Image (cartoon, grey):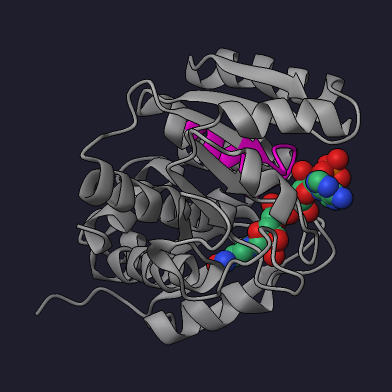
Amino acid sequence: MSDKGTPILHMLDPSEHVSPFDVNMATDAGFKVIIPYTHVELKKVTALVQDAIFSRPPNYGPQTGVFFGGKDAILALDMMKAAKEAMVPPFELSTFADPAGSFTTAAAMVACVEKVLKDKFNTDWKGVKVAIFGATGVVGFASSIITALEGAKVQLVAHRGVERVVKAAELSKERFGVDLEAVPGETPEQKRDIIAGADVIFAAAAAGVQVVSKEHKELAKNLKVIADVNAVPPAGVEGMELFMNGEPLPGCSALGVGPLAIGDVKYKTESGLFKQMIASDKAVHFDFRDAFALARSFCS
Ligand SMILES: NC(=O)c1ccc[n+]([C@@H]2O[C@H](COP(=O)([O-])OP(=O)(O)OC[C@H]3O[C@@H](n4cnc5c(N)ncnc54)[C@H](OP(=O)(O)O)[C@@H]3O)[C@@H](O)[C@H]2O)c1
């Protein structure tokens, strides 16, 4: 077996601390040395990466990982791009962006719902109307891009001021070429209309915030599947059970996917990508697209 070197993970984070969740995941996946870097600015990424690549022989490169955390999906992707551009072949390293766990969580949610759509409704994402609550959050944002790339008609629901979701939609068009619809969901009437028209709902709002009530569910006549990533009571969707995975959601005709069914696939996906970094003989680079491909394999 060739000598690949000790697996080292440099965790770069623009905020004040790295995520203990990600440190645990990386350790359990097999990284032997993990170093947190905090308050990292985009402009510092090139120097940090070049400092790392030239200190190890090229065959150790793939086991030298850089992880991008934080709470900003676009910044994490920009950091990853800067890291890739900083490499000087054959001196390279592997990268993985998963800010606030959002890429692997969104990938898991979309993959779990996709399986229910396929198994119970014999359909894929093409033309499916998806309403996303918590659309300005990192999980909501990443899930909007993944589903839109699969051909869904995605609505980003604003709960306070539509301007921020309009900006997210513009950014998504520019960066990923997808058309997302920004809709105001502030008044009870606006929210009712959105829920009544949706085929799929993602409840991706902040922990402990309920966005879909019993009354909302009664209006959801077209709804096929509703997914809730929030594991902190009260549930993001009234009546959602933590491990629900395609069972009927009481009080409506839709099927539910709960936070711990999603969490199980998220866990396997994040762990699996870390393991792939360690096992690879060449430098690899993972973002939400890779997370979705792997999450899908766990749901097939
Ligand atoms: N199941 C899992 O495996 C898993 C893993 C990771 C995260 N999560 C959960 O995923 C959810 C989203 O996480 P995140 O990191 O994306 O959070 P985030 O970045 O803090 O985003 C939270 C979103 O919720 C919105 N929001 C806040 N209060 C609201 C309210 N009263 N009504 C409607 N929307 C509201 C925010 O809107 P504003 O921007 O307007 O404030 C924002 O869009 C959280 O519940 C988190 O616990 C689950």
Q: Residue at x 90, y 26 (%)?
A: 161
Residue 257 position in % (x across, y down): 47, 60
Give residue 251's quadrant in the image: bottom right
Residue 221 position in % (x across, y down): 53, 36
* 279 displayed left or right of 66: left
Query: Which is more toward the observer, 37 or 117?
Result: 117
Residue 167 visible in the shown view: yes
Residue 14 visible in the shown view: no
Query: Which is more toward the observer, 3 or 129?
Result: 129
* 78 displayed left or right of 260: right
Residue 18 position in % (x across, y down): 71, 69
Magenta segment includes 59: no
Residue at the far left in the pictured view: 1
* 237 displayed left or right of 270: right
Q: Quadrant of the C terminus?
A: bottom left
Q: Residue at x 49, y 17 (%)?
A: 178
Q: Is residue 178 above or below residue 24?
A: above
Q: Is residue 7 above or below residue 247?
A: below
Q: Which residues are magenta?
A: 132-145
Q: Residue at x 70, y 67 (%)?
A: 235
Q: Is residue 152 above or below residue 226?
A: above
Question: What number of labels is visible?
Answer: 0
Q: Is residue 164 above or below residue 258?
A: above
Query: Which is more toward the observer, 89 or 17?
Result: 17
Q: Quadrant of the N terminus?
A: bottom left
* 261 displayed left or right of 144: left
Magenta segment includes 140: yes
Residue 154 position in % (x across, y down): 54, 25
Query: Which is more toward the observer, 289 or 10?
Result: 289
